[in-house]
């Protein structure tokens, strides 16, 4: 029987694309795990591939290191699970420290303060419980008319008895 993977398929066209199912070493079809554990076929094959990947990565490590960090949704190591990883800027705590000698210290202090305030502002917007405090450094823009003081009209007397109420000026003095 002629097959494309063995190279015995005779055709007049060049095989520019070989589907993965016909490639040698293809591990996509897992008929033995069709309806196991009451899970769907897609989730079961995903778990099977993750187990295969974990075994391969664990066997490919050298004895001198732990290997790289390969985060996935299904992993044996809880620190590598994507849902367990920190979503804040804590990942930069372990970053290498570099010392610069041409630093403007006043500007550096301002940038550090601004960075801290902006991260607090970001955490405020990400908070869905309403427990974090609003940062007053950033505020929503307002109309220019709202930023000016509302003064009484010029034609009014200086004494409160002489002021009259009109529906056009709803501010009571």
Image: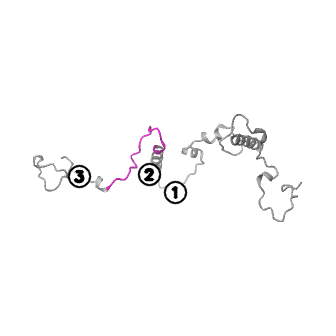
Residue 86 drawn above or below residue 102: above
Give the label on residue 150, or none: 3
Return the residue nearer the eye: 66 or 32.
32
Left or right for 59, reference 78:
right
The residue carrying mark 1 is 102
Give the label on residue 67, or none: none
Spot the residue most to the top.
Answer: 37
Return the residue nearer the eye: 66 or 27.
27
Q: Is residue 51 magenta?
A: no
Residue range highlighted in magenta? 124-143
Left or right for 48, reference 122:
right
Q: Mark 1 Cα within 10 Å, few/some/many (few <14, many 20+)? A: few
Q: Main secondary structure of the magenta part?
A: loop
Q: Is residue 128 magenta?
A: yes
Q: Viewer-nearest of labels 1 and 3?
A: 3
| Secondary structure state at the residue bearing disc 2 | helix
Spot the residue most to the right.
Answer: 1
Of marks 2 and 3, which one's residue comes earlier in the chain? 2
Q: Quadrant of the N terminus?
A: bottom right
Q: Residue at x 58, y 49 (%)?
A: 97
Quadrant of the rendered structure where residue 36 is? Answer: top right
Q: Are marks 1 and 3 in contact (CB under 8 Å)?
A: no
């Amino acid at each position: 029987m002629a097959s494309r993977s063995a190279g015995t398929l005779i055709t007049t066209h060049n095989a520019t694309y070989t589907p993965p199912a016909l490639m040698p070493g293809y591990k996509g079809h897992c008929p033995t795990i069709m309806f196991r554990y009451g899970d769907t076929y897609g989730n079961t094959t995903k778990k099977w591939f993750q187990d295969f990947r974990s075994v391969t990565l664990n066997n490919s490590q050298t004895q001198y290191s732990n290997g790289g960090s390969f985060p996935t949704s299904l992993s044996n190591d809880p620190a590598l699970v994507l849902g367990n990883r920190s979503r804040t800027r804590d990942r930069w705590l372990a970053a290498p420290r570099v010392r610069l000698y041409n630093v403007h210290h006043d500007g550096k202090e301002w940038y550090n303060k601004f960075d801290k305030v902006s991260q607090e502002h970001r955490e405020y917007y990400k908070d869905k419980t309403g427990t974090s405090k609003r940062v007053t450094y950033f505020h929503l823009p307002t109309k220019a008319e709202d930023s000016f003081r509302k003064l009484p009209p010029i034609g009014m007397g200086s004494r409160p008895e002489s002021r009259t109420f009109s529906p056009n000026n709803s501010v009571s003095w």
